[in-house]
Image (cartoon, rainbow, N blue to C red):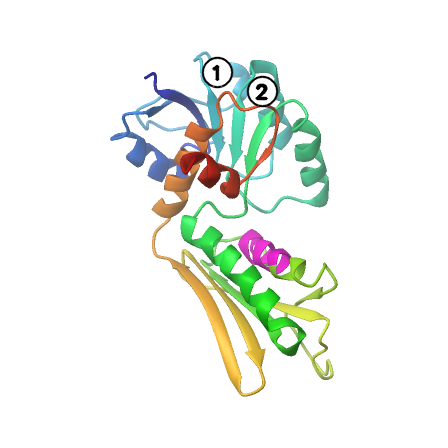
Amino acid sequence: MEKTRIILCGACGKMGGNVLSLLADDENAVAVCGVDLYPREIGIPVYTSFADIQEEADVIIDFSSPVGLTERLEYAKAHGLGIVLASTGFTADDVALINAYANDVAIFKTANLSLGINLMQALCKAAAEVLGEEYDVEIVEKHHNLKKDAPSGTALMLANTVNEAFEGKKRFVNGREGIVGAREKSEIGIHAVRGGTIVGEHEVMFAGEDEIITISHSARSKRVFAVGAIRAAKFLPQKAAGMYEMKDLLAAEND
């Protein structure tokens, strides 16, 4: 079996380092080169632009940022590669661009590559369906002090999942300040905490009369996201153009 050949975008960052560390012992996948605005020696060729890449590949793992998104998607389209979008902070215009390229490119996009978070997502939806309108839903997410976007993509993913149980009728309230009045049943509160080196913590609280149910997840290392990205990279080659997410990967692995 030939190894899945990966172009690693954001290769010189922390997540790039985690991916390379895991790939060093992987018998089925290899990073053939990297792309990074600030290249350094990491054991594979690193380019500042996709236009400079010389190596043949099967898939792109993108752990960079939304900046330069068009270049990455265009390269994937031109070379027939799948792409794993492992970063967050995409604008509405970015999402529209990604959806447009999905007509020609196999794109794996999820707000969180952790298996645990995806299980949490399913549990939250089930809880919302059972508990219904009698329980207020509040989401708290915590991340390190360098994270640029808030609320986190994962918090929004969880909020949207819960909202599916309410047919999309809930509105999101990002934090509260001042005299805001009594909480309305139509709200899902989302609160962001930033500090220190917190990798990622998410808590969904269902608060009812005289009882509270909390579903939470804590990532203790960034390696869990690297593991998910590599699994996605192995899943994507030979897939038809379109949008894929963790539930598609898990279905394929358990088929």
Question: Is residue 75 part of the magenta span, yes or no?
Answer: no
How many C-alpha atoms fall within 10 Å of the one at disc 2: few (<14), some, or many (≥20)?
Answer: some
Q: Secondary structure at mark 2?
A: helix
Query: Which residue type carries mark 2?
Result: Tyr
1 and 2 marks in contact (CB < 8 Å): yes
Q: Secondary structure at mark 1?
A: loop
| Residue 154 among those drawn in magenta | yes
Residue positioned 64% across, 78% down in the render: 134
Q: Which mark is residue 53?
A: 1
Label 1 vs label 2: CA separation? 10 Å
Say if residue 56 shows up in the picture: yes
Main SS category, magenta section: helix
Vertical comparison of 238 with 14: above or below: above
Q: Tag 2 or tag 1, which sits nearer the N-term?
A: 1
Left or right: 116 as drawn, with respect to 28: right
Q: Reply above or below: 229 against 148.
A: above
Measured from the top left, where is residue 101 in percent x and y?
67, 27
Which part of the image, by quadrant, shows the N terminus? top left
Task: Tell me, yes or no, if residue 63 can be seen here.
Answer: no
- Image point 52% across, 38% down: which residue? 248
65 to 220, vertically: above or below: above
* Residue ID for mark 2: 75
Residue ranking furthest to the left: 25
Which residue is nearer to you in this view: 168 or 26? 168
Q: Which residues are magenta?
A: 152-161
Which residue occupies 66% across, 34% down? 98
Give residue 167's quadrant in the image.
Answer: bottom right
How many numbered circles does the render carry?
Answer: 2
Give the percent coordinates (x, y) of residue 38.
Answer: 45, 31
**Amino acid type for the residue under numbered disc 1:** Ile
Q: Quadrant of the C terminus?
A: top left
In the image, taking residue 144 as reference, residue 24 lies left or right, namely: left
